Image: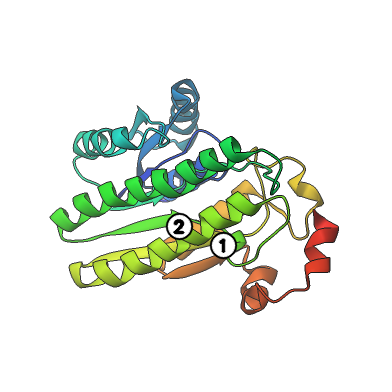
Amino acid sequence: MSELKNKTVVITGASAGIGEALAREFAGRGYHLGLTARRFERLEILRSDILGGTGQPGLRIEIAELDVDQDETVAPVLHELFARLGGVDIVVANAGINRFTGVGKGQLADARRVIQTNVIGAIATVEAAAEHLVSRGAGQIVGISSLASLQAMPKQAAYCASKAAFSMYLDAARLELKRKNVAVTSILPGFVVTDIMPKIEKFPFAVPAAQAAREIVTLIEQRKPVGVVPAWPWKWLRPFFGHFPDSLWNKLA
């Protein structure tokens, strides 16, 4: 267990999946935490579990209920959490969803929900984070995007589009905020075993959320502009995304 750091990280969508794994990994490295999610009761359980397992009495964890779908509530909730924590150093925009959405199958409502959460909700998170960190004069914003932002896949049209939009937004934010001493890191996970997508284990090179979190936190600490997780094999295959034959993805769908 690492010694406590004088750093605080806020993670949205922290009640399960990559968000929960990131909370555990950051805590293990000595970071104070601010955690948000729709399911407040799961945050309470997670906080108790982490505090009971770290052996670090000085570790601080604050939690807040937040549904990023309700984008008008994102800034007020996050700014209240930032104040409660006495300021933060890193904000991870992790909250996201996936829905299998075919084209021409009457699934507009599902597609709209994916876009609302993964684009509008994520942008609202980055906006609030940028306001806070710019006022502090330093910090880091991390967006959990996806390798799906680089490669279209059948039955994933809305998800791929949402992550492509968020990745481009993060790239633009990086250019704007660099001069204000705020770093922006875009994380592109491959196939990670979480409850966001069923039967993910059948996909190639799928990894547990805990492994993904270890790699993600290392990339964040290195302040990389873009990081691919897991590094093997996706880091080396990344230049080919968008150029794989359609037949490959149709077999996986």
On screen, residue 201 above or below 245: above
Query: From the viewer's perspective, is 68 left or right of 42?
Result: left
Task: Count how many numbered circles sit on residues in the image.
Answer: 2
Q: Mark 1 points at which residue?
A: 149
164 relative to 16, above or below: below
As helix, strand or loop, the secondary structure at mark 1 comes to helix
| The quadrant where residue 105 appears | top right
Confirm or deny contact between disc 2 and disc 1 (CB under 8 A): yes
Question: Which of the two discs, 2 and 1, labels the residue nearer the N terminus?
Answer: 1
Residue picked out by circle 2: 166
Which x, y percent locates residue 1? 47, 47
Q: Under tag 2, what secondary structure?
A: helix
Q: Residue at (55%, 45%) from the top-left corner?
A: 18
Residue depicted at x 70% and y 46%: 104
Could you give the CA–CA distance between mark 2 and mark 1, rounded to whole angstroms?
Answer: 8 Å
Q: Where in the figure is residue 8, as x and y percent of width and height?
A: 30, 47
Residue situated in front as seen by the camera: 80 or 90: 80
**Residue at the top extreme, as displayed:** 41
Residue at the spot 65% in from the left edge and 72% down from the top edge: 242
Q: In this view, does 155 lie to the left or right of 119?
A: right
Left or right of 140 in this view: 118? right
